[in-house]
Image (spheres, grey):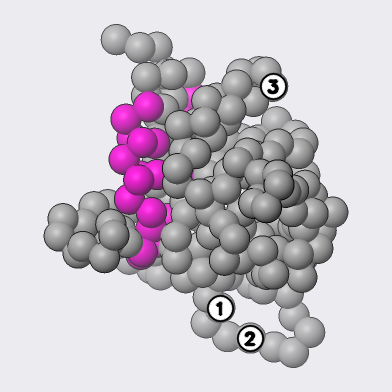
Amino acid sequence: MTEIKGKIGVIIEDHFDQTEYRLFNAHFPEYGYEVEYISHLWGQPALHFGGNPDDGIYDPIEKVTVTTEINDINPDDYKGFICIGAYATDRLRYQASVKKGQKNQAPAVVFLRKVINNPKIKLGTICHSLWLFCADSDLIRGKKVTCAHNIICDVENAGGDVIYEGDATADLVIDGNLITGKHPGVTMQFIEAFVKEIESAS
């Protein structure tokens, strides 16, 4: 049995990327890291989320039951946090009430503010999941990142420094405690880099 070295929290909502979900579950435990799924539960003991369809096919869709409320966790209990890709992170930006001039108060955004400047806690995004960081430009301004081509404008408008390779965004970018991947096709490369960054900080 592989020794458990710590926990990685994956912040999730409906319409998450199924490729990332499968590979996180399969490979982080091989490196000795438990994967725990985290979300805002809206006062419920548990919520059930479904993945995005693969290539437009709705069956089968991965499903996950989440019982860990993001408002209640202690970041120091984790080695790092990953915002899962696809449209889940757009949903995580939702605010029940808003006020002019007020920063985004969605629980997942508030949580990122707590951990963004902690060098001991690694943060990761793949594909569309930088959307969550775009909810508050203080989270991303000046950081070197990569992302899906679909959201380049969002990321650059929020102040992120998108790194390019030829006529595409870079596959993987590491800037301080933030590790970003271009799309689900680089998930294995992302996992390896994320583990390396965790272990170099230990």
9 inside magenta stretch: yes
Q: Amino acid at mark 3?
A: Ala
Q: Secondary structure at mark 1?
A: loop
Q: Which quadrant of the structure image shows residue 43? A: bottom left
- Residue 75 in view: no
Q: Which residue is mark 3?
A: 201
Cα separation between marks 3 and 2: 38 Å
Q: Which residues are magenta?
A: 6-27
Residue drawn 77% across the image and 36% down it: 176
Q: Secondary structure at mark 3?
A: helix
Label of residue 95 in the image: 1
Disc 2 to disc 1: CB gap under 8 Å: yes
Q: Secondary structure at mark 2?
A: loop
Q: Total label count? A: 3
1 or 3: tag closer to the N-terminus: 1
3 or 2: tag closer to the N-terminus: 2
- Point out residue 56 in the picture as x, y percentages from the top left corner: 26, 65
- Point out residue 120 in the picture as x, y percentages from the top left corner: 70, 31
- Residue 178, compared with residue 62, is above or below; it is above
Q: Which sits in the foreground, 133 or 97?
A: 133
Cα separation between marks 2 and 1: 6 Å
Label of residue 98 in the image: 2
Residue drawn 69% across the image and 22% down it: 201
Q: Which sits in the foreground, 127 or 46?
A: 127
| Residue positioned most to the bottom | 100
Residue drawn 29% across the image and 10% down it: 1
